[in-house]
Image (tube, grey):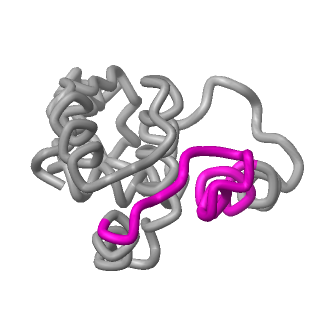
Amino acid sequence: MKFLCVECDRQMAFEERRLPGDGTLAAAFRCPQCGRVVALLTNPMETQLVASLGVKIGGTTLPPQPLESIRGTVTTGKHDAFEESGEKGEGRGPIWSGEAQERLARVPGFVRGMVKKIYAEYAKEHGLAEITPAVMDTARSELGLEGM
């Protein structure tokens, strides 16, 4: 996706990206010819969807690598972002209570692995051996994910 300046018919250049902390994402693009600025603002669900798809807002500062999109899916996609480890307390992470597993089952499948990973990392960072609905609520509040 590219933004074009309507007046100049030129591709706008990425200028700035901000993550305000409320789950939204803001990005600004400027026309290199006339200086016109356009801003993009996503709501928390759109931000989560964009992140889960691996979309890079503003492009990359490195030159494109061979098979970059495929390599990204293989090395960072389903392998770690959607990993299903720690489910049964196999020494790889906290265990999930039955109630927490039921609640997790209501999360849309395409982001469930990522949501599970967020809660598992929160539990590890706080030294929690079990993830319960109360832990999930506390994590959502502390991580600013209430709107999701």
Judging depth in this view, the residue of 117 and 56 nearest the camera is 117
Looking at the picture, how far across and down is residue 68, in whole percent?
A: 78, 50
Judging depth in this view, the residue of 75 and 61 nearest the camera is 75
The extreme right residue here reads 66
Q: Which residues are magenta?
A: 76-99
Looking at the image, residue 76 sits to the left or right of residue 103; the answer is right
Identify the image quadrant of the C terminus: bottom left
Judging depth in this view, the residue of 131 and 61 nearest the camera is 131
Residue drawn at (28%, 43%), measured in percent from left and top? 135
Residue 38, can we see it? Answer: no
Q: Residue 78 occupies which quadrant of the picture?
A: bottom right
Indicate whether 109 appears above or below 125.
below
Q: Does the magenta-highlighted stretch encompass residue 19?
A: no
Looking at the picture, how far across and down is residue 141, in whole percent?
A: 16, 35
Q: Residue 79 occupies which quadrant of the picture?
A: bottom right
Residue drawn at (60%, 32%), measured in percent from left and top? 60
Residue drawn at (29%, 78%), measured in percent from left and top? 106
Judging depth in this view, the residue of 89 and 76 nearest the camera is 89
Looking at the picture, how far across and down is residue 146, in whole percent?
A: 12, 46
Residue 46, can we see it? Answer: yes
Looking at the picture, how far across and down is residue 27, in whole percent?
A: 27, 32
Task: State the count of labels.
Answer: 0
